Amino acid sequence: MVVYLDVIWALNLFFDSLLLYLTAIFLKRSIRIWRLLAGGFIGSLIILLAFTPINVYSNHPIAKLLCSVMMVLAAFGYKRLSYFLKALMTLYVATFLIGGALLGAHYFIQYDPELTTKVLMSSVKGFGDPVSWLFVLIGFPVAWHFSRRHMEGMEMTKIQFEQIVNVSLKIGSETFVFKGLVDSGNQLYDPLSRLPVMFVSIKNQLDAIPEQIKKIATDPEPLIMGSGEVPDEWQNRLRIVPCRVVGQEHQLIVAIKPDNILIEQNGDQYLCEKGLVSFTMQQLSADDAFQCIVHPKMLTGPKQQGGTVKVS
């Protein structure tokens, strides 16, 4: 029998990459093509190792688990343990879904009278393999529990994804684009102008942010105390806004008035010409799913016609 190893390897590379892509779709995560292919390549190495002297070790369940871990790390990276475990479990869910569907379809369309007779005879004469029964009795409740918890986590991810919007800020000649989370709990207004305030994290985008904004986000205390120097073009943009956070009754933050704020949600664009933005170095999302917290009042502006706001 002739075995075309290159064809088998290419198919496994393709299938493993598709499984990682399906995992990214389930989790609503953006993924780069090269990371997708890198993860698929790591998974396809199992096929190549099967034709080497170490195939005894490469086919061991622990080796397969380590291979899955490396696939997830290559495709999604590591930000925190829950972020990594959710991707790993979703990869297995996607694999079992696709594998179960293919196996079910195969047995549905295939009929073997001899195989059916053997299965029926073993069912009549005994209770089957006791190891299989033990596996089912123990494995089913565990699988049910983790599947339920995992599907609840996926549902929460879906709800959060539906609240994610694309935000474009225009300040002078500069335009900044972020992903934002619409938070109904954010009810912060400037008490003098009654303008809603949006919080924006620039921690992971320092290269694209002007020096003046980085200075305000890094050390706002001099501006709040009145000892900091501000360029003339920023004089009319700065606002000192009081706010309350957990553990502190009164706190002052520095906010900037942009020329306009354009928000895209579900294909609709909303123009907010009256709003404030407070830049911070604090990361607002642990897995960087969004970089700003959008005030719901900002979505009440007039709808705009035209193209979409793209987030790189």
Image: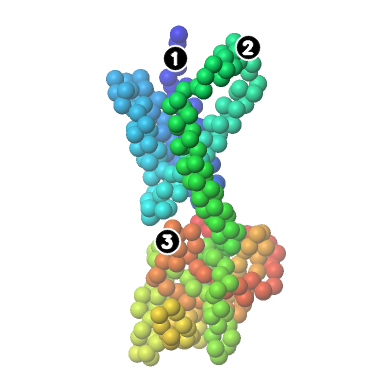
Mark 1 closeness class: few <14, some 14–19, many ≥20 residues within 10 Å: few
* Amino acid under disc 2: Pro
Q: Nearer the viewer, mark 3 or mark 2?
A: 2
* Amino acid under disc 3: Ala
Real-space Cα distance between discs 3 and 2? 56 Å
Q: Which residue is mark 3?
A: 286
Q: How many marks?
A: 3
C-beta proximity under 8 Å, tags 2 and 1: no
> Is 168 left or right of 278, judged from the image as shown?
right
Q: Residue at the far left: name it.
A: 53
* Amino acid under disc 1: Val
Which of the pair 95/262 is nearer the observer? 95
Which of the pair 22/86 is nearer the observer? 86
- Rendering coords of residue 21 (x, y %): 51, 42
Q: Which mark is residue 3?
A: 1
Real-space Cα distance between discs 3 and 1? 47 Å
Real-space Cα distance between discs 2 and 1? 30 Å
C-beta proximity under 8 Å, tags 3 and 2: no
Q: Is residue 190 above or below residue 42?
A: below
Give the structural element (helix, strand or loop) at label 2. helix
Q: Which residue is mark 2?
A: 113
- Rendering coords of residue 207 (x, y %): 39, 64
Question: Residue, x 34% and y 34% (percent of image)?
Answer: 62
Which of the pair 249/234 is nearer the observer? 249
Question: Residue, x 40% and y 70% (percent of image)?
Answer: 282
Q: Is residue 270 visible?
A: yes
First in sequence: mark 3 vs mark 1: 1
Give the structural element (helix, strand or loop) at label 1. loop
Which of the pair 239/249 is nearer the observer? 249
First in sequence: mark 2 vs mark 1: 1
